[in-house]
Amino acid sequence: MKIGVIQLRSVLSPEINLITIKNFLAEAKTEGAKAVFLPEVFYSMSDGTRPTPYLIEDKNEHYEAIRNLAIHSGLYILGGSAATNVDGKIMNRSYNFDPQGNEIATYDKMNLFAVDLSKHPSQTIVDEARVYSPGNTPKMISLEGFNIGLSICFDLRFPELFRSYSYRGANVLSVSSAFTIPTGKAHWHTLLRARAIENQSYVIASAQWGQHNEKLSTFGHSLIIDPWGEILVDAGEGEKIVFADLSLEKLESVRARLNVIRNPKV
């Protein structure tokens, strides 16, 4: 199955972000991709001190704008997240739609990011708990033999989540992200390759990149990694879409060689 991964420099305005995304989806359709993965907070990027004013709530116009990405492109739209008002709580919610616009599943980010790099040259300080409430339920979706475990950004640092997905039959791990530059340089590639290797799964890491506003810059380097831990695609810097083919035969081959027992209690 051919998949695309979109790397964005999202800003506060959804209209600007959607124009970029639609152009990349048209390219994905031309390239024969079946599914496209979007990064964290692709719809509207706030400065991290307060929620975006463009909140999804119930089935409002912002929800429909995301749903229409699938309908108009005829592609699966997966992984990407948007700030969502749920009974007064703001959730960082991943939306997943089939090509007809049917909602497959949503996932609310469970592990909220907090970092104090005030002494680093970047002077980055982020505390997502000031904006978001955490989710509490892992979610998986299935697509043509691929079982995809959903996660968002800081979830990457909690390997037990991915081990649990593997135990439940996941063979693809989606990590939609907006990694800061200092933590991205230090840990991004290493952590993602580790999740692929230890779970013998594809890892699809769709990332934000660049200067989004006065307070936030992100690392980029969206990755597609195979079950052996080899990086198939590294998007580097810039807004772009990258592609790779996922192979069930490759999964079976790797897992036959190592025969890792998938049990979160071990």
Image (cartoon, grey):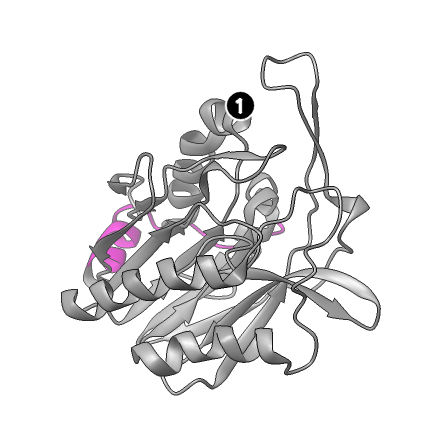
Q: Position of residue 155 (x, y in %)?
A: 60, 47
Residue 233 lies in quadrant = top left
Which of these two is toward me, 131 or 144? 131
With respect to residue 247, does 11 lie above or below?
above
Q: From this view, report whether residue 3 is shown above or below residue 238.
A: below
Q: Nearer the viewer, residue 203 or 127?
A: 127
Q: Quadrant of residue 126?
A: top right
User: 10 Å neighbourhood of mark 1: few (<14), some, or many (≥20)?
Assistant: some
- The spot of residue 109 in percent (x, y) is 65, 56
**Count of all numbered marks drawn on residues in the image:** 1
Residue at figure coordinates x 57%, y 56% from the top left: 44
Q: Please tell me which residue lies in front, 21 or 39.
A: 21
The answer to whether residue 167 is seen in the rendering is no
Q: Residue at x 22, y 54 (%)?
A: 244
Q: Secondary structure at mark 1?
A: helix
Q: Quadrant of the N terminus?
A: bottom left
Q: Amino acid at mark 1?
A: Pro
Stretch of the chain drawn in magenta: 250-266
Q: Is residue 119 visible?
A: yes
Residue 83 in percent (x, y) is at 65, 61
**Residue 84 is inside the magenta segment:** no
Q: Residue 92: which quarter of the image? A: bottom right
Q: Nearer the viewer, residue 9 or 190?
A: 9
In the image, residue 42 above or below residue 191 = below
Q: Going by the picture, which residue comes out furthest to the right? A: 88
Name the residue at 30% across, 80% down: 74
Question: In the rendering, at what x and y percent does residue 197 appear?
Answer: 38, 41
The answer to whether residue 83 is left or right of residue 79 is right
| Residue assigned mark 1 | 182
Relative to residue 233, is residue 159 drawn left or right?
right
